[in-house]
Image (spheres, rainbow, N blue to C red):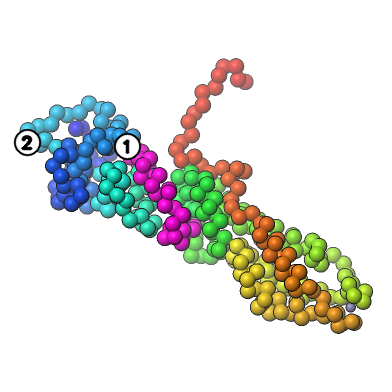
Amino acid sequence: MQADQSDSSAVIRPRGEFHSLFSGTEGDVILGSKDGVLFRVHSYTLKTTSGWFRSMYSLPQRSPSPDQPTETIFVDEDSMTLEGLLKIICGLGLPKLDSYDVIEPILHAAEKYDMPGPMSVVQALLATPPLLSDPLRLYAITCRYGWHEDAMMASKATLTLNLHSPEHRSTLQKLGTDALLNLFALHRTRRETLRRRLDDPPFVNDSGDTSCSNCGSIVDYHTWRELKYVIIMEMDARPLGDTVCNSGLLEWPAARACWDAKCLNCDRVLYDKTLTMRVIRECIEQLPTTIDSRSSPLPPPYPAPIIARSTSEP
Ligand SMILES: [Zn+2]
């Protein structure tokens, strides 16, 4: 076969050892990995599972010579990636897909060789614990391949993270602009919606003097203002809000001060702790939990087709 000389996969590398799963004698093509491991497979399998190989085999083929009956195609992928890809398309069971260092090269190769099978296998495993444990990287992958539903699921999982933390910078830099803005919008919307809600009844707001509900004398609600500030700062660092409801409102000094505050005139407590905590929890539960992909759609997985316009259109 005549490989495309402009493609780096055409570089001939030294012949190495066969991979044990792909060492049979029946295959009619040998794939060589970047690190020199050989994989013997059937060209029929490649043609039926890969648009790239289907196109390649549609080109005129060189007749096999007696001294070289089987052609060898060297590719850019390392043996681990090639093994994963070939195990899936040859039906030899799933490779271990439990880390981003494994799935990212497989996805990259599957996209390059136009192999929907391996792509869909990885996509089906996105919500498994090893991948879900790094939600930001999960979000980056789902956006990269235009998997909207999965991107929404991943965006929800990022709510435990502080996007402003320097440790996330390198992952955020890999996101497209829309994906990045959508994620920041989700985190900010949760904080700002809660901030506005905490000024509405039954909460006291900052507009003018407020009187004690028991004796009518003017009271100072600064302890509530301080607790609101601490709640909003916590939502900024961890937009999920679980640390507000579960421990913050019980343990923060600002919370204790709020629940202990009394009217200086009649000595009655100013805030109903049980009601306040319940309403704050309800407010947090009503906040949006995923990116809104409808308002700012993620990029399509493949270049969008150019739609031919009819001549009747303006
Ligand atoms: Zn009072």
Between disc 1 and disc 2, the foreground one is 1
Answer few, some or many: residues within 10 Å of disc 2's Cα (few below 14, many 20 plus, some between 14 and 19).
few
Magenta stretch: helix, strand or loop mostly: helix
Query: Which residues are the magenta region?
Result: 111-137
Q: Quadrant of the N terminus?
A: top left
Q: Does any portion of residue 36 appear in the rendered image?
A: no
Determine whether 162 is above or below 71 in the image.
below
Viewer-nearest residue: 172 or 189: 189
Q: Does any portion of residue 271 appear in the rendered image?
A: yes
Answer few, some or many: residues within 10 Å of disc 1's Cα (few below 14, many 20 plus, some between 14 and 19).
many
Report x, y in % for residue 103.
Answer: 37, 52
Q: Secondary structure at mark 2?
A: loop
Residue 276 quadrant:
bottom right
Q: Furthest-top residue in view?
A: 312
Q: Furthest-right residue in view?
A: 216
User: To which residue does mark 2 refer?
Assistant: 67
Mark 1 or mark 2: whose residue is earlier in sequence: 1
Report x, y in % for residue 180.
Answer: 54, 52
User: To which residue does mark 1 refer?
Assistant: 50
Determine whether 77 is above or below 272 in the image.
above
Viewer-nearest residue: 201 or 233: 201
Q: Is residue 180 magenta?
A: no
Report x, y in % for residue 187.
Answer: 61, 58
